[in-house]
Amino acid sequence: MIAAWLAGIAAGWVALASVLDLLGRRSPPPAQSFDAIIVLGCKVFPSGQPSTALAERVKLAAAMFDSNRAPLIVTTGGTGDSGHAEAEVAARMLIDLGVPRRAIHMEARSTSTQENARYCAMQLPARDVLLVTDAYHCVRARRVFARYFRTVATAGSVHPSARLRAKGALREVPVVLLYALLRWV
């Protein structure tokens, strides 16, 4: 009986993680434009190199900028264990990808999705934003940012490693529940 109950919980957890990942892969309509594209921060290594997840987010944001989705890209994320601010690493990568420096704004003090949204809202006059984050993170990020911005759409990047993508999606399930309990979503 307990084994069946635990198997049911595990199956539900995997199903929720899969749904989060699938929902996040939907992009906004091609004709929709925004005041800003916001790239949510992610791990940076001690060498200052972005994690694959951050690099994928930045590449997607640069592509959205190149397709004229918004005139501004905001990079977010403070300094973590690496000693490098995620926002600064992402901004350097955007410049390397050809995004003009004048089109990049950094929010370099946040340490969570909640802080990403709050600090961006405090710094930007933007009301309509396009968030770029991992696909499985889109549902929670959209709900959090909707507390601060008029229009929020998401574009989910997909990590090339299925194993790491699954790990992130599985980790996202309890975080969504925690954010719901805290009434942040």
Image: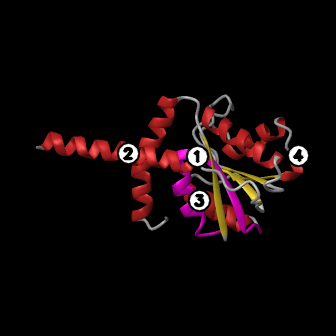
**In whole angstroms, how far apart are the C-alphas of marks 4 and 2?**
41 Å
Label located before the other in sequence (4 or 2): 2
In the rendered view, tell whether residue 142 sits above or below residue 42.
below
In the rendered view, tell whether residue 95 sits above or below residue 20.
above
For disc 2, the marked residue is 15
Residue 25, numbered label: 1
Confirm or deny contact between disc 4 and disc 3 (CB under 8 A): no
Residue 116, image quadrant: bottom right
- Determine the residue positioned at 29% across, 42% down: 10
Camera-side residue of 53 and 13:
13
Label located before the other in sequence (2 or 1): 2
What amino acid is labelled 2 in the image?
A: Ala
Give the class, few, some or many, for how many residues have Cα within 10 Å of label 3's Cα (few <14, many ≥20): some
For disc 4, the marked residue is 100
Give residue 50's position: percent from left, percent from top: 66, 34
Give residue 39's position: percent from left, percent from top: 68, 49
Please name which of the two marks, 2 or 3, marks the residue nearer to the observer.
Answer: 2
Q: Is residue 174 visible?
A: yes
What amino acid is labelled 3 in the image?
A: Glu
Camera-side residue of 175 and 137:
137
Residue 115, numbered label: 3
Farthest left residue?
1
**In whole angstroms, how far apart are the C-alphas of marks 4 and 3?**
26 Å
Residue 180, numbered label: none
Give residue 156's position: percent from left, percent from top: 61, 46
- Label 2: element kind: helix
- Label 3: element kind: helix
